[in-house]
Image (spheres, helix red, strand yellow):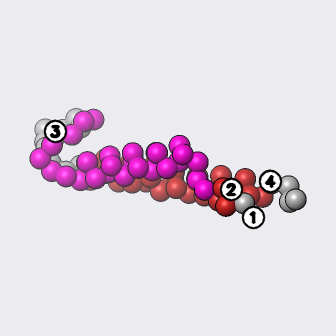
């Protein structure tokens, strides 16, 4: 089995890192958080953090599905 076929694509890794950074950003109080429409934009935003954490999990699962799909469609030599 080729080791390269078991690696996630760069876009999956990039999106995972971006979603993780955004999740941490919304959990840290004291910043003016973007996309907040309430009266307290400087408090931590649990709903936003959960949304980006769920997107992170979906990205990781999707990446694993892509790896398994590529592994199954390869013709053995």
- Callout 2 touching callout 3 (CB < 8 Å): no
Q: Is residue 30 magenta?
A: yes
Kindly report which numbered mark, 4 or 1, lies closer to the viewer in this rendering. 1
- Callout 1 touching callout 2 (CB < 8 Å): yes
Label 3 sits on residue: 32
Label 4 sits on residue: 73
Q: Position of residue 28 (x, y in %)?
A: 19, 52
The image quadrant where one finds the C terminus is bottom right
Label 2 sits on residue: 5
Kindly report which numbered mark, 3 or 4, lies closer to the viewer in this rendering. 4
Kindly report which numbered mark, 1 or 3, lies closer to the viewer in this rendering. 1
Secondary element under disc 2, as helix, strand or loop, is helix
Q: Position of residue 2 (x, y in %)?
A: 72, 60
- Callout 4 touching callout 1 (CB < 8 Å): no
The image quadrant where one finds the N terminus is bottom right
Taking the spot 39% from the left edge, 45% from the top edge, the residue there is: 18
| Mark 1, other Cα within 10 Å: few <14 / some 14–19 / many ≥20 | few
Taking the spot 15% from the left edge, 43% from the top edge, the residue there is: 31
Q: Which residues are magenta?
A: 7-35
| Mark 3, other Cα within 10 Å: few <14 / some 14–19 / many ≥20 | few
Q: Earlier in the sequence, mark 3 or mark 4?
A: 3
- Callout 3 touching callout 4 (CB < 8 Å): no
- Callout 4 touching callout 2 (CB < 8 Å): no
Left/right of residue 60 with respect to residue 49 in the rendered view? right
Label 1 sits on residue: 1
Kindly report which numbered mark, 4 or 2, lies closer to the viewer in this rendering. 2
Q: Nearer the viewer, residue 22 or 54?
A: 22
Q: Earlier in the sequence, mark 4 or mark 2?
A: 2
């Amino acid at each position: 089995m080729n080791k390269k076929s078991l690696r996630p694509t760069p876009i999956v890794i990039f999106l995972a890192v971006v979603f993780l950074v955004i999740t941490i950003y919304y959990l840290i109080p004291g910043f003016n958080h973007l996309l907040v429409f309430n009266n307290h934009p400087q408090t931590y935003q649990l709903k936003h953090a959960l949304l980006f954490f769920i997107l992170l999990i979906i990205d990781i699962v999707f990446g694993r599905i892509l790896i398994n799909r590529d592994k199954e469609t390869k013709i053995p030599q």
